[in-house]
Image (cartoon, grey):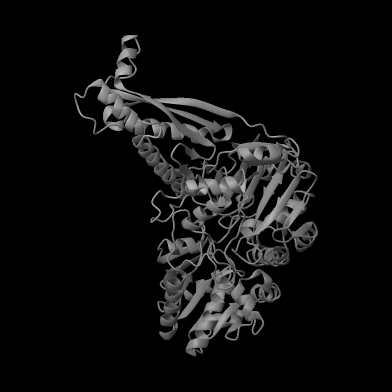
Amino acid sequence: MQVEVVPLGAGQDVGRSCVLVTLGGKRIMFDCGIHMGYTDTRRFPDFRYISRSGRYTQAIDAVIITHFHLDHCGALPYFTEVQGYRGPVFMTYPTKALVPLMLEDFRKVVVDRLGEAEHFSATHIKSCMRKVTAVDLMQTYKVDDELEIRAYYAGHVLGAAMFYAKVGDEVFGPSVLYTGDYNMTPDRHLGAARVERCRPDVLITESTYATTIRDSKRSRERDFLQQVHECITAGGKVLIPVFALGRAQELAILIEEYWERTGLTVPVYFSAGLTSKANVYYKLLVSWTNQVVKDMHQKHNVFDFRHVQPFDRSYIEKPGPCVLFASPGMLHTGMSLDVFKQWCHVERNMVILPGYCVPGTVGNKLIAGHRGPLQIDQRCTVDVQCKVAHLSFSAHADAKGIMQMIREAAPRNVLLVHGEASKMEFLKAKIIRTLGVPCYNPANMETVAIPTGGSVRVDVSKDLVKQALQEHIRRDEDAPPAPCDSLPVEGILVAKGGTQGVGFQADLVGVAEAHTALGVQPHALTLSCRLRCCAPASFLAPKQAQGADPASKRQRKEETLSPVDEAVQNALNTVRTQMQQWFGHSVEAEQSPNTFTARSFEAKPISDIDGADIEDKASDGDTSEKPNAHVIELSCTWQYEDDPLAHRVLSMLERQIET
C-alpha cells in the first residue's frame, strides 16, 4: 500500500497551494488557491491533471480548505462553478464565514479596478459556499464509509486548521496530516498550533521559512514600534501592507496598546471595506482566539479599536503624519499598491513589510533592496525614495517550529510544500539527519509514491513498564535518571478482539500475566543445571600452607572447605550486589547460608574437588580444568519466565569464581 502525493501548486514554490493526495483508493484535494505573482493562466492550479475529460466530481472524493488566504482558497469558486466539481468541500466555521469576503474583494479588485477577465462572478461565490460543509476542531467527520477527516488548531489566522485524513480501519488504514499554514508560536490574538501524536503515514507541511529561526517576538515588536514612532515624529507617513485578516488585527492590537500607553494622537487608519467587515467576525469568533483575548473579552473586546479609524481614498493626499494598514500584504494590487505609488517618492515616508512576499510582487522587490525607478506595470513606473523595513511578523512556522511539529505528530514520512526549492533542500537534509524520517520535496506536477505500513496499537502491562523504567535508572542512586525518547520493553504480545480490522487489539504482558490474558491455566516449567567452575587455589584456600602433607590438606579441607565455604559465600554476595546494581529493586536478590535466590532462581553449593582430583581427571583426558585449582559445583534451578535472569546470574557467578 502507498500514498501518492502530487502538488498542483506550492511544489517548490510559495502560492497557489493545491495538493492532490491519493490514499486507500480515495483522492483528496487539500487547498485550492491562486498565485499572487501571475496574472495569466498560471494563476490557477492545472486541474487538467485530475481529469482530462473534466469529470472532477468522479475523480475527487473531497476538497479541504485549510484557511481563508487567497493562495489557499482563491481558485475554489472557479473549480466548483466553472470547472464543474460538485463533490463535498470542507472547512472550519470561521473559514466558511470569511472566505466569501476574501473572494469577493479579490474579484472586485481584479475585474473592476484592473480590468482583467472575470474568472468567476459574485453569483459563483455564493453558489460555491452553499456546497461547503463546516467542521469544528477535533471533530471526526465521516466523508463516506471509509474516509474520515479531523481538524486541528493551526494558529496561523482565525479559523485556520490542519486536517488529518484516514481511510479504512482504525489500525491498518493509510493516513495523512496536511498542515496548510500554521504557527507554533502564540501571538497577541491567536494561540499556537496544536496536534495530537497521530502518527500519520505522511505529514505534508509548509516550509515557507525553512531556513529561518526568528528572534524573540518581543524584540520584533519593539523594533516595529520604534521605527513607526521615529517616522511619524519626523512628519512622515507609514504604510504597512497587510492582508486584511490576520496580521492586520495582530499589528493593530500592538499599535492600539502603544498609542494608549504613550498618548500619541497621530491618526491610524485601516483601509476601509474588507477589514472593517472582517473585524465584525473577529468580534463574533472570540472563541477561536487565544486565552488572553478570551479572558479580556469579559471586560473589553480587543477588536474594538479606539485609535484605529477607517481610511478613505481622499486621505492619500492629506498632509501630515499617519499610519495606514492597507491590503494586500504583497503590494501586488489594491489599496496598498495605490497608496505606495503616491507615497514612495518622499524620503521621510516609510513602508514596513511585516510578512512574506512571493517573487514577482512589488513587496518582494522592495525586500530585495530595490530603490530608485521601479516599474509597477507596463503603464506605471515610480521612483522609490522612501525608507523600507522588513520586520517578519509572519504567522508561519519557522524552521524550529517545523521541526517541533514533526516531533509532535511523529509521522513515518514528511513531505515539504509551500516553500522555495533551495531552502526546502536544506530543511529536507536536516530532517533526515536529525530525526531519521524520510523526507520529500516534489516540484509542481511531480508524483511522489510513498510506501506505507500498517500500525498496531499495543497496550503495555503496567508491571512491564515499571520493570523497564527501573532497569533504565542509572546504577548510581545519587545520579538522576538519564532521559530517553524511547524505552525497550520485553514481553509476550497477545492479539485479541479481531484480526486486521476494526476492533483489533493487542496487549504486551509479562510471562506471569500471559495465562490470564489468554484465559488458560498456567503450567510451571522448572529448569535446572549444574554450574561447574574451576576456581584458582587462592580462591577457596588463600591461606593454605605451601608444601603441607596430604593428611594435613585433607584436615584443612574438612575444616574449611564445607558446602557453605566462606569464599563461595563471598562470591555469591558479590553477585547479589551486582544484581542490585543491574536490576535495582525490580529483582530482590537474597542470600542465606546455604542458598542464593533471585526471583525463582536458586543456587546451592554442592561440593568442591581439590587440585589432586583434578590432576587425576586430567590424566584421563579431561584437560578442561587446570591443576592446582578447585572445582566448585552449584546446583541451580529456576522457572521458565526467569530464564533471561538466570542466564545473567550464571554468567556473573562463573566470572566471580573463575577469576
Image quadrant assignment for residue 245: bottom right
Q: Position of residue 272 (x, y in %)?
A: 64, 77
Q: Position of residue 141 (x, y in %)?
A: 76, 53
* Up-down relation of residue 574 to residue 211 (above or below): above
How many numbered dots are placed on residues in this image? Answer: 0
What residue is shown at x 62% (from left), y 39% (from top)? 512
What residue is shown at x 52% (from left), y 45% (from top)? 468
Image quadrant assignment for residue 608: top left
Residue 453 visible in rendering:
no
Front residue of 173/268: it is 173
What residue is shown at x 21% (from left), y 29% (from top)? 545
Residue at the far left: name it: 547
Q: Judge from the rendering whether residue 608 lies leftward or rightward of residue 431; answer left or right.
A: left
Q: Position of residue 584 (x, y in %)?
A: 46, 48
Q: Position of residue 39 (x, y in %)?
A: 60, 55
Front residue of 193/328: it is 193
Residue 474 visible in rendering:
yes
* Up-down relation of residue 166 to residue 94 (above or below): above
What residue is shown at x 52% (from left), y 57% (from top)? 358
* Up-down relation of residue 579 to residue 268 (above or below): above
Instruction: Name the quadrant of the N terminus.
Output: top right
Instruction: Name the quadrant of the C terminus.
Output: top left
